[in-house]
Amino acid sequence: MAIPLKSWQEFKGERVYVAYNLHACRVGSTPKPGEACFTLRYKPGGKVQAHLTEISLADITPKILPGTLQAIQRKGSRQVCCYIEGTVVNPQHVKGRKVQASFNPFEGETFYLKGTEADLVHADYAIFENRTMFVVRPNRKVARAPNPTPVSTSNLVSRLKF
């Protein structure tokens, strides 16, 4: 059964995994209008739910399948070994400067930001369009709550009355 071409709207608000469609979109070939270059799954290695021409995700995290990556590097084969996990959002709501991101299993073991070559660890948004992945606000530091002031046990003991 053929997997249908779908719109991002059918998955809005869902946590999904998006990967580049290696079989439909050959790297180096001329893209066709409306070419579905991305696949959507509910879990890494799971059944492809849809082929997409574009999609935007919020709160993204890159995922690499180490065993598959090692097999690719050893054999020189082409298979899906990485995904971007995120929540599907309306692309019109994504604001900010786009930075191109990429992954090449023969050159490294992580997603990276083109231009700076910095590893991509997290981003507020990912935009998949025209065979390319862009991220918005990559590797932003997450604000952490300050450490509580340590309590001295000697002060507590002196206040206790037996």
Image: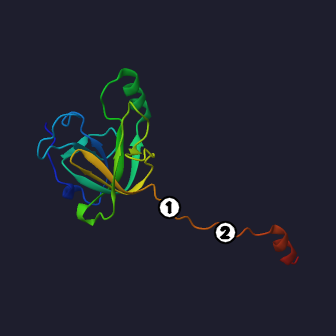
Where residue 161 sits: x, y (%)? 87, 78
Labelled disc at residue 148: 2
Q: How many marks?
A: 2
Relative to residue 106, is residue 89 depicted above or below? Answer: below
**Left or right of residue 5, residue 43 in this image:** right
Residue 52 x %, y %: 19, 47
Marking on residue 120 = none
Q: Say which residue appears at 57% left-offset and 67% top-offset.
A: 145
Between 85 and 137, the residue placed more toward the observer is: 137
Q: Residue furthest left?
A: 33
Local secondary structure at mark 2:
loop
Q: How is the image coloured?
A: rainbow
Which mark lies nearer to you, 1 or 2? 1
The correct choice, above or below, for 67 with respect to 37 in the image is above
Nearest the camera: 127 or 11? 127
* Left or right relative to 149: residue 109: left
Residue located farthest toward the top when viewing the structure as drawn: 75
Residue located 44% across and 34% down the image: 66
> Regarding mark 1 in the picture, which secondary structure is present there?
loop
Residue at mark 1 to residue at mark 2: CA–CA distance: 18 Å
> How many residues crowd around disc 2 within 10 Å: few (fewer than 14), some, or many (20 or more)?
few
Q: Could you say which is closer to the camera, residue 102 or residue 126? A: 102
Q: Which mark is residue 142?
A: 1
- Does the residue at mark 1 contact the one at mark 2 (Cβ under 8 Å)? no
User: What residue appears at the point 40 percent right and 32 percent down from the top-left corner?
Assistant: 107
Image quarter where the C terminus lies is: bottom right
Is 148 drawn above or below residue 25 in the view shown? below
